[in-house]
Amino acid sequence: MTRTLIRGGLVITAAEEVAADVLVEGEQVVALAATGSAVAGSWTAERVIDATGCYVIPGGVDAHTHMELPFGGTAASDTFETGTRAAAWGGTTTIVDFAVQSVGASLRAGLDSWHAKAEGNCAIDYAFHMILSDVTEDSLKEMDLLVGEGITSFKLFMAYPGVFYSDDGRILRAMQRGAENGGLIMMHAENGIAIDVLVEQALAAGKTAPRYHGEVRRELLEAEATHRAIKLAQVAGAPLYVVHVSAESAVAELAAARDLGLPVFGETCPQYLFLSTDNLAEEGADGFEGAKYVCSTPLRPREHQAALWRGLRTNDLQVVSTDHCPFCFTGQKELGRGDFSKIPNGLPGVENRMDLLHQAVVDGHVSRRRWIEIACATPARMFGLYPRKGTIAPGSDADLVVYDPQAVQTLSAATHHMNVDYSAYEGRRITGRARTVLSRGTVVIEDGAYLGRAGHGRFQPRATCQYLD
Ligand code: URP
Ligand code: ZN
Ligand code: ZN
């Protein structure tokens, strides 16, 4: 078995920071010892990586991606191959993507087709959540089977009527089933029925530009849906994980529920922490530039960012995922020229999350350990991958990043590796960068070169939520 030694770095996990050498055998971490100690000094290895001046952190766990998702009349532009390669460049070594149940079809059919898309193509490890688009007696039964196969979380939508939408009765049934079989319900919390009325009224009034996407998807309708989802989960006796939280008032709903002791969790995304309605209002040459920033929940006025950062510090929000769902500006976002409701919803970001969050450390929003907690450890625990993923300990997978906290980079579509023709963070200067990335003991990124291969990444069956333990 190949032995790899990472020497001289500052090892950072959610729990501690320690100057330590890390010994890897094959695919796993086997030992840590204080740098300079007799134990560490006795170690030999075929490959020695000098991490002096760098952090050694667990590979990022991005618990919300949509590679190749058919959506909005097109499909997300990153395949499992291009998207997981880009993730590796950015120091993320596990993604949890969303398999989709089509209306009228089984969960099995949806899951099989996502397995077929991913298998043999991924550069890093991957797992699946399941989107429930059609809650029926049959699909409720299938939930039990999927939990047994390591698909232990299910996303429901209060938005997108006619596509993924479920009404309250269906949501309640799925939550009740989840309470029985251990499946964690993830919620897209926006009142889609009310939003569709506002969309129709806006278009009728000639309001067609991208910025109206943000105006009709009102903050109140995110807060209302978040509140309703919490109450439905309470009735069902089920835990709840609210995805892509963007509004201050939605954070307040989560905080109030948590203050009551309810098992309610929330995720936000870099776009809500770093971007705002100012971006949605960008006009460019022809008034359509803002389409690059159309996602749902939508970007909010920048005043909301402080509440999101606070929520991350107080643990009213536990996870930062990307909701990576890229669509090229040319030919894809352009489907919504003249009608903002036809702009495919979603932003790229799987490559940028670890760096943007390191910038948040530099800027004083979160501590280094909290960075690792929200980006690695908690997503792993929330979705049943811990301690295989999300930490550095004997027995953990050797998903490791040697992170240079002093490197300066400028984010740009010209240099990123995501298969999308723009960057949502174009021109943003970031301090910090992944220098070396290992996936299960294999070096996949080293000093500006990709050394990985499609097919290295393996499907990871997951345990049920470990954040409740
Ligand atoms: O705009 C978004 N978020 N697109 C992806 C689908 C979803 O709702 O997560
Ligand atoms: Zn969603
Ligand atoms: Zn999503």
Image (cartoon, rainbow, N blue to C red):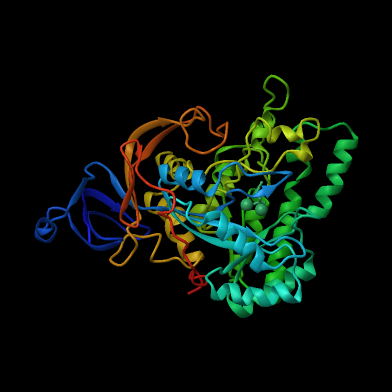
Compared with 285, 341 (above or below) is: below
Which residue is at the front of the view, 414 or 273?
A: 414
Residue drawn 30% across the image and 37% down it = 447
Q: On the rendered structure, is 85 left or right of 277? A: left
State the image coordinates of residue 335 (x, y, percent, origin top left): 74, 35
Q: In this view, does 234 lie to the left or right of 452?
A: right
Q: Is residue 168 visible?
A: yes
Q: Give the answer, above or below, for where 31 lies relative to 19.
A: below
Numbered label tally:
0
Furthest residue toward right = 204
Q: Give percent across and percent down for residue 46.
A: 17, 52
Which residue shows up at 73% across the image and 38% down it?
343
Q: Where is residue 107 in the image (x, y as percent from the top left)?
A: 66, 67
Against 229, residue 281 (above or below) is above
> Residue at the spot x=71%, y=61% of the render?
227
Q: Residue farthest to the top?
A: 285
Q: Percent from the top left, x then y, of residue 74? A: 70, 43
- Quadrant location of the N terminus in the rendered image: bottom left
The picture quadrant where one finds residue 130 is bottom right
Q: Quadrant of residue 135?
A: bottom right
Answer with the quarter of the image where residue 179 lies. bottom right
Q: Name the residue located 57 percent from the left edge and 31 percent from the top edge.
A: 422
Pick the front one: 147 or 198: 147
Can residue 234 be seen in the rendering of this structure?
no
